[in-house]
Image (spheres, helix red, strand yellow):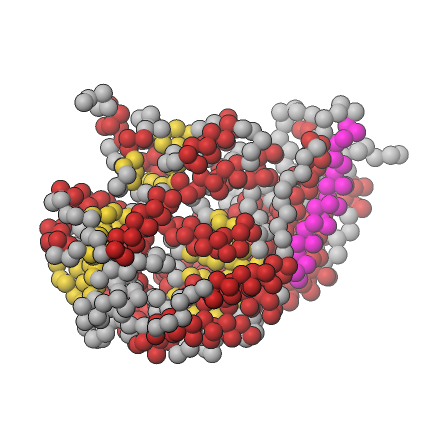
Amino acid sequence: MKLMNHYAHTGNREDRSDWQLLEHHLENTAALAAERAAPLGLRAAAHMAGFFHDFGKYDPAFDRVLCGDNVRVDHSTAGAALLCARAPAGLRPCAEVIGYAILGHHAGLPDRRNADSSMERRLDAFRDPIAPEISAAAKPDFNPIAKELTARMRPGSAPFDLSVAARMVFSCLVDADFRDTESFYAGLNGTRPDRDWPALADLLPEWRGVFDAHLAGFDQSGPINRLRADILAHVRKGSAMTPGLFTLTVPTGGGKTLASLGFALDHAVRHGHRRIIFTIPYTSIIDQTAAIFRGLFGDAVLEHHSAIDDERTDPERKDKLRLAMEDWAAPLVVTTNVQFFESLFAMRPSRCRKLHNIAGSVIVLDEAQALPRKLLMPALRMIDTLCAHYGCSVVLCTATQPAFDSRQLKQGGLPLEGRELAPDPVRLARELRRARIVQGGEMDDDALIEALRDTPQGMVIVNSRAHALELFNAAKAEELEGLVHLTTRQYPVHRRAILEEIRARLKSGAPCRLIATSLIEAGVDLSFPKGWRAEAGLDSCVQAAGRVSRNGEWPIEDSTLTVFSAPGRPMPNEVRKLAEAMRSIAGRHDDLLSPAAIRDWFEHVYWNTGSARLGQPMVDRMILGRSGTDFPFRSMAEQFRMIETTMVPVIIPGDATAVEAIRQLAFEHIPSGKLARALQVYTVQVPAKARALLVEAGHASFHQPALRGDQFCVLDNAALYHADSGLWWEHAEYLSSEAWLL
């Protein structure tokens, strides 16, 4: 007797001649998943996940779903249930690794137990509706998978290592599933999604030539330029070292970004890395770095961060979701710490899809000291695992190297001894010294304004956008000449223009009095004669000092960063603790810019915190035994949040480019992902409640919600965006009711 056909996806014809057979989808997905997992050493595991991921579509009831009947069929449990039932004694963990991926390929990775959506409860509740002859024909072989997974575990860290292997299998599966589904529908529609990226290996000869030509155009005269050239040459020589963990400790002004890029290019050539990933802690400067790289290497550079959240696209829109997904297949990716690490600990398919493409990468963690303390241990474990098992090299790049070395951070530290790329960081700190940090005591806004009045070119950095705006408005009322405000209230394209204005003023000697938030502290090429910084951690103050006499334009005795306390301005609890630690260190060191003071501060911060408050319990929650696993993937994704405050984007139609991209939201054939990338440089991140008030009051709205869902919130009231200070969202409801008043 011939078995009935089973289908994975519908076509256009009533006779089903153009529908996708389920067996074809399973075979295609298995092959694509195995292809993605091959460089990871997980080919057999990913192949099995692909072959069984939609096994539940053999349920006869699923045919009714395809025909449009309003019935619910759980097709994501059957494959996991079959594998867990068939696993030989002792190999249950192998079956569960595949099971997590199968159970999660739509709804996201589950927890092992406790929750209603957990693996345990779903398997316990499962009642097999599939014909016995179909299940009997399935003969999974766990032995190759056991070998692969065993090779991806180390004594002492086996549970965490295995959890990362499960994430990688999941990534390969969901990407393969998306790709085969996308390919099937593209074939029906006669389209071909543009997903082809050139391989890094093919680009490196040209890119290194472009990079060398770029360097040749630099001024080589003067001691600072010669020192930068020496640093670059030394760092590039380090590319011959074996792949793994590295530190790059260079003071501000020493050319860290170019040195790390040169290392990444040379290291990838020597060791065959598949891509280069730069992670940056602040969205405020990611566009600047990406623009530099695109200027060198063109459109093969992918900029990806969370300014616009692709996950908000309606998952039922096959033609939109698949195209909007980011898989990080580009040869050079510029992203944020939030996007990078939260993806590595995510549970949603859309966020995890990129993980297998992180393997085999040179990863530069710019401003490595910015990793949040409460998540430090899981973040370091993930970095270590990527290097140990997935062919990555990770460069911890900073002017203030944190105490991540296992010789300092006793529990959970990294093996960093002998892996420094810079030549003699202590000597560099001495030779690149351009400013001094001095203590200013209490300074209220009036005192800060008077200090700026006496300083034609100077900067003040405070700890919040609200304080910065109030101080700016007060200084403006005092009619200070050359007053400039820089804040994340402004969208990135606008900030770039303001930065160019600041540089022009500084170069010409014109008055330039900047009031800013901490966004200018890292990676922004500005140089003021003097500066003032509200109390914070020593790492932030050192970064701020890097904006004072950055290129040695003024005598060091006159180039001061004054650290002050702001009365009546309560600090967030985390910042307050770091500021207290800095006061303690200031009592023991005359020179707060010395490597000894910086090392002392980081050790003080981490040692006093203790591993439990550095996120170690998250690592310990990964449990492995012969009887199975206990991996709380979903719970960890909820817990691993680098930014606690819920911030959401508002798009500012600031110029013709933005207006045109907003207009194109109405065109169904243009992918949401493409428009999101175009518009992310026109967004301002605001509190979720503030955006809701803007929408409720009619000042903003979601454009084209039928096509794009709630992904693209656009400011409709242009009066709320100010040329000198950005978006004012406060009192949105008041502005609505009183808008008619003149």
- Residue 376 in sight from this viewpoint: no
Q: Which residues are magenta?
A: 16-41
Q: At 67% from the left edge and 35% from the top edge, which residue is drawn?
A: 191
From the top left corner, tell me how far across and down residue 348 is, in percent: 53, 45
- Whether the magenta-drawn stretch holds residue 17 is answered as yes
The location of residue 450, given as percent across then percent down, is: 11, 53
Q: Is residue 348 above or below residue 386?
A: above
Note whether 441 is above or below 721 in the view shown. Answer: below
Q: Is residue 26 within the magenta segment?
A: yes
x, y percent for residue 112: 55, 51
In front of the other: 253 or 103: 253
The residue that appears at 61% across and 34% down in the rendered structure is 318
> Is residue 62 placed above or below 571 in the rendered structure?
above
Q: Nearer the viewer, residue 697 or 411?
A: 697
Quadrant position of residue 608: bottom left
From the viewer's perspective, tell me whether residue 439 is left or right of residue 170. left
**Left or right placement of residue 221 versus residue 472 in this view:** right
Q: Residue at x 43, y 63 (%)?
A: 257
In the picture, the quarter occupied by the C terminus is: top left
Q: Is residue 454 visible?
A: yes
Q: Residue furthest top?
A: 740
Which residue is at the far right?
Answer: 1
At a point 33% along the width and 50% down the height, the residue shown is: 500
Residue 369, by quadrant, is bottom left
Q: Main secondary structure of the magenta part?
A: helix
- Image coords of residue 672 (percent x, y): 52, 36
